[in-house]
Amino acid sequence: MSSLQIPALLRPVIALNGWTFAMEIWMYATRLPVFSRLKVADDNTRTRSDLDRLTPPSVRWKADNYNNLFEQPTQFYAIALAMAIARRGADNPVDVKLAWAYVAVRIVHSLVHVTSNNIRRRFTLYVLSSGILAVLGWRGAALVF
Protein backbone atom coordinates (compact mmCIF):
# COMPACT_ATOMS: atom_id res chain seq x y z
CA MET A 1 0.00 0.00 0.00
CA SER A 2 1.52 3.32 -1.07
CA SER A 3 1.24 6.40 1.07
CA LEU A 4 -0.49 9.45 -0.32
CA GLN A 5 1.82 12.43 -0.85
CA ILE A 6 0.07 15.59 0.32
CA PRO A 7 1.27 18.64 -1.63
CA ALA A 8 2.97 21.18 0.64
CA LEU A 9 1.12 23.92 -1.26
CA LEU A 10 -2.08 22.82 0.49
CA ARG A 11 -0.75 23.74 3.95
CA PRO A 12 -0.86 27.51 3.43
CA VAL A 13 -4.35 27.12 1.90
CA ILE A 14 -5.55 25.39 5.07
CA ALA A 15 -3.68 27.91 7.26
CA LEU A 16 -5.39 30.90 5.63
CA ASN A 17 -8.74 29.15 5.93
CA GLY A 18 -8.02 28.59 9.64
CA TRP A 19 -7.13 32.26 10.03
CA THR A 20 -10.44 33.21 8.41
CA PHE A 21 -12.28 31.13 11.01
CA ALA A 22 -10.24 32.76 13.78
CA MET A 23 -11.27 36.18 12.46
CA GLU A 24 -14.89 35.06 12.37
CA ILE A 25 -14.74 34.07 16.03
CA TRP A 26 -13.05 37.38 16.93
CA MET A 27 -15.67 39.28 14.93
CA TYR A 28 -18.59 37.60 16.70
CA ALA A 29 -16.93 37.94 20.10
CA THR A 30 -16.86 41.71 19.64
CA ARG A 31 -20.06 42.25 17.64
CA LEU A 32 -22.54 40.13 19.57
CA PRO A 33 -22.20 42.09 22.84
CA VAL A 34 -22.70 45.38 20.95
CA PHE A 35 -25.67 44.05 19.02
CA SER A 36 -27.29 42.61 22.14
CA ARG A 37 -26.96 46.00 23.88
CA LEU A 38 -28.56 47.64 20.84
CA LYS A 39 -31.28 44.97 20.75
CA VAL A 40 -30.95 44.67 16.98
CA ALA A 41 -32.25 41.10 16.92
CA ASP A 42 -35.71 42.44 17.70
CA ASP A 43 -35.63 45.20 15.05
CA ASN A 44 -35.84 44.02 11.45
CA THR A 45 -36.06 47.59 10.13
CA ARG A 46 -32.36 48.36 10.70
CA THR A 47 -30.11 48.45 7.70
CA ARG A 48 -26.43 47.60 7.66
CA SER A 49 -25.54 51.29 7.44
CA ASP A 50 -27.72 51.93 10.53
CA LEU A 51 -25.84 49.25 12.41
CA ASP A 52 -22.48 50.54 11.19
CA ARG A 53 -23.27 54.01 12.57
CA LEU A 54 -24.15 52.49 15.94
CA THR A 55 -21.18 50.11 16.10
CA PRO A 56 -17.83 51.32 17.43
CA PRO A 57 -15.15 51.46 14.71
CA SER A 58 -12.88 48.95 16.49
CA VAL A 59 -15.75 46.44 16.35
CA ARG A 60 -16.58 47.22 12.69
CA TRP A 61 -12.94 46.66 11.71
CA LYS A 62 -13.22 42.98 12.60
CA ALA A 63 -16.27 42.52 10.36
CA ASP A 64 -14.64 44.52 7.57
CA ASN A 65 -11.53 42.37 7.75
CA TYR A 66 -13.55 39.17 7.83
CA ASN A 67 -15.24 40.30 4.61
CA ASN A 68 -11.82 41.17 3.12
CA LEU A 69 -10.76 37.57 3.68
CA PHE A 70 -13.41 36.53 1.13
CA GLU A 71 -12.18 38.89 -1.54
CA GLN A 72 -8.57 38.66 -2.80
CA PRO A 73 -7.75 35.45 -0.87
CA THR A 74 -10.28 33.56 -3.01
CA GLN A 75 -7.86 34.07 -5.90
CA PHE A 76 -5.09 32.65 -3.73
CA TYR A 77 -7.16 29.55 -2.99
CA ALA A 78 -7.89 28.99 -6.68
CA ILE A 79 -4.29 29.53 -7.80
CA ALA A 80 -2.75 27.39 -5.05
CA LEU A 81 -5.20 24.53 -5.62
CA ALA A 82 -4.74 24.67 -9.39
CA MET A 83 -0.96 24.58 -8.96
CA ALA A 84 -1.12 21.67 -6.50
CA ILE A 85 -3.27 19.70 -8.96
CA ALA A 86 -1.15 20.61 -12.00
CA ARG A 87 2.05 19.56 -10.23
CA ARG A 88 0.42 16.24 -9.25
CA GLY A 89 1.73 16.53 -5.72
CA ALA A 90 5.30 17.39 -6.72
CA ASP A 91 6.26 20.35 -4.55
CA ASN A 92 8.01 23.39 -5.94
CA PRO A 93 9.82 25.11 -3.05
CA VAL A 94 9.49 28.58 -4.62
CA ASP A 95 5.70 28.22 -4.94
CA VAL A 96 5.40 26.93 -1.38
CA LYS A 97 7.47 29.84 -0.01
CA LEU A 98 5.43 32.34 -2.00
CA ALA A 99 2.19 30.81 -0.71
CA TRP A 100 3.38 30.97 2.90
CA ALA A 101 4.56 34.55 2.35
CA TYR A 102 1.11 35.45 1.03
CA VAL A 103 -0.57 33.91 4.07
CA ALA A 104 1.84 35.64 6.47
CA VAL A 105 1.26 39.05 4.88
CA ARG A 106 -2.53 38.55 4.93
CA ILE A 107 -2.41 37.65 8.62
CA VAL A 108 -0.32 40.74 9.41
CA HIS A 109 -2.75 42.79 7.28
CA SER A 110 -5.63 41.42 9.35
CA LEU A 111 -3.91 42.24 12.62
CA VAL A 112 -3.20 45.81 11.51
CA HIS A 113 -6.78 46.16 10.25
CA VAL A 114 -8.47 44.95 13.42
CA THR A 115 -6.21 46.64 15.97
CA SER A 116 -5.07 50.06 14.72
CA ASN A 117 -6.61 50.21 11.23
CA ASN A 118 -3.60 52.23 10.10
CA ILE A 119 -4.55 52.83 6.46
CA ARG A 120 -1.03 53.45 5.16
CA ARG A 121 0.28 50.27 6.78
CA ARG A 122 -2.74 48.28 5.60
CA PHE A 123 -2.34 49.55 2.05
CA THR A 124 1.36 48.68 2.01
CA LEU A 125 0.56 45.17 3.17
CA TYR A 126 -2.25 44.88 0.63
CA VAL A 127 0.07 45.91 -2.21
CA LEU A 128 2.70 43.44 -0.98
CA SER A 129 0.17 40.60 -0.82
CA SER A 130 -1.12 41.56 -4.28
CA GLY A 131 2.39 41.39 -5.66
CA ILE A 132 3.00 37.96 -4.15
CA LEU A 133 -0.34 36.77 -5.50
CA ALA A 134 0.48 38.15 -8.96
CA VAL A 135 3.76 36.22 -8.98
CA LEU A 136 1.94 33.06 -7.89
CA GLY A 137 -0.66 33.65 -10.60
CA TRP A 138 2.02 34.16 -13.23
CA ARG A 139 3.81 30.98 -12.11
CA GLY A 140 0.50 29.11 -12.14
CA ALA A 141 -0.28 30.34 -15.65
CA ALA A 142 3.19 29.31 -16.85
CA LEU A 143 2.56 25.87 -15.37
CA VAL A 144 -0.84 25.16 -16.89
CA PHE A 145 -0.62 26.93 -20.27
Image (spheres, rainbow, N blue to C red):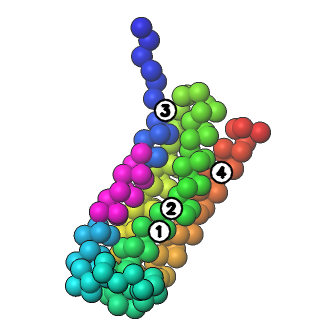
- Could you tell which of marks 4 and 1 lies nearer the N-terminus? 1
Q: Residue furthest top?
A: 1
Q: Could you tell whether 39 is left or right of 93 in the image?
A: left
Neighbor class of circle 4 (other Cα within 10 Å; few <14, some 14-19, many 20+) is some
Q: Position of residue 88 (x, y in %)?
A: 59, 27
Q: Which residues are magenta?
A: 14-25
Magenta span dominant secondary structure: helix
Residue under pointer 2: 70
> Above or below — where is 58 with respect to 8?
below
Residue under pointer 3: 7
Residue under pointer 4: 137
Q: Could you tell whether 116 is left or right of 77 in the image?
A: left
- Could you tell which of marks 2 and 3 lies nearer the N-terminus? 3
Residue under pointer 1: 67
Quadrant of the snapshot with the N terminus: top left
Disc 4 from disc 1: Cα separation:
22 Å
Instruction: In this rendered view, identify the residue nearer to me: 61 or 113.
Output: 61
Dot 2 amino acid type? Phe
